[in-house]
Amino acid sequence: MTNVAQMPTSATGDVKYKRVLLKLSGEALMGDRDYGLDPQTVERVATEIKDVVAEGVEVCVVIGGGNIFRGVSGAAKGMDRSTADYMGMLATVINALAMQNALEKVGVQTRVQSAIPMSSVCEPYIRRRAIRHMEKGRVVIFGAGTGNPFFTTDSAAALRASEMQCNALIKGTKVDGVYDADPVKVPEAKRYDKLTYMDVLAQDLQVMDTSAISLARQSQIPILVFSIFNHGAFAEVVQGKGLFTLISD
Ligand code: UDP
C-alpha cells in the first residue's frame, strides 16, 4: 500500500516534515482573557499557520475546547459525564470555526471537518477527503475531537495524525518544550531537548495524555512540543530548527 505521507508534495526548501498535524489547546487562543477566544490571538496563530502552508507543508489542525468548556468540569458540578463531554466537543467546533475564519481572512483555504456531523456548519469527518484537501493545499481543521466522550483532543490529535499519516504531531504550547515541572511556577525546572515516548509515560510528564502518547508511539509519529507564542517558531519547527522538544523512540 502506498504510504500517503511519502507521496510527493509541493514542499520546498528545508522543510523536514511534509505533512504535519498542529495541536493547539483551546487556552492557546484565549490571549489574556479568562474565557473564550481572543480574536487577535486567533489571527496571530492563523498567520503562523499561513507561513507554514506557504512553505508547501500540508497542515491539519486539532484545537481543544478548554477555553470554553471541559467535560470534567461539568461532571464535577454534577452533570452526566458523557453529556458534559459532548458539550466540550461542541466547544472545539466553535474554536475550529474561529480558526477557519481567521485563516480564510489571511488567504488560506480551509475546510472544517467535524467528528460529530453537523452538515449546515461544516463537512463531516471523511478521512480520504481530508487527505485530498491537504494535497490541494487546504488546511483541514478537525472539530469535535474523536467524536466520543471520555477522550480528549490530545487523543484526537494522535488519532487524526495517524489516519492522515502525518510526518509529525506538533503541539503548540505556552512554553518552548517539555520541562520536568511547570517553568512558569518553578524557574529552575529542567527543559528536555529530546525524550522517548516511554520517558514521557514513565515519568508522567504532562505533555499529552497517555493514550495520545501511546498511539503516537504505535504509529511512530514524532511529537514536537514548541511555543506557539514565539513568532515564527512553527515555521522553524517544520524545518527541524528552533526550540522544541522532540519525543520519539
Ligand atoms: N472531548 C471529548 N472527546 C474528545 C475530545 C474532547 O469528550 O475526543 C471533550 C472533553 O470534555 C474535553 C473537551 O472536549 O474536556 C475539550 O477538549 P480538551 O479538554 O482536550 O481541550 P484542550 O485542553 O486541548 O483545550
Image (spheres, rainbow, N blue to C red):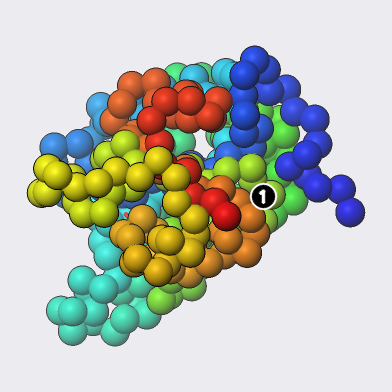
Q: What is the number of callouts on the image? A: 1
Q: Residues within 10 Å of mark 1 (few under 14, many from 20)?
A: many
Place of residue 61 in the rendered image (x, y in percent of width and height, measured from the top left): 50, 43
Please tell me which residue lies in front, 181 or 235.
Answer: 181
Please tell me which residue lies in front, 128 or 151.
Answer: 151
Q: Quadrant of residue 29?
A: top left
Place of residue 238 in the rendered image (x, y in percent of width and height, measured from the top left): 54, 30
Residue at the image position 27 percent from the left and 39 percent from the top: 175
Q: Is residue 95 left or right of residue 126?
A: left
Label 1 sits on what residue type? Answer: Met
Q: Which residue is mark 1?
A: 164
Asked whether residue 46 appears in the rendered view, the answer is: no
| 165, above or below 151, in the image | above
Within the displayed image, which quadrant is ligand 1 positioned in? bottom left
State the SS at label 1: loop
Q: Is residue 44 left or right of residue 10?
A: left
Residue at the image position 60 percent from the left and 51 percent from the top: 221
| 249, above or below 214, in the image | above
Q: Is residue 231 left or right of residue 125?
A: left
Please tell me which residue lies in front, 31 or 101.
Answer: 31
Asked whether residue 156 appears in the rendered view, the answer is: yes
| Quadrant position of the C terminus in the picture | bottom right
| 168, above or below 110, in the image | below
Place of residue 37 in the rendered image (x, y in percent of width and height, measured from the top left): 25, 41
Residue at the image position 49 percent from the left and 20 percent from the top: 51
| 216, above or below 7, in the image | below
| Quadrant position of the N terminus in the picture | bottom right
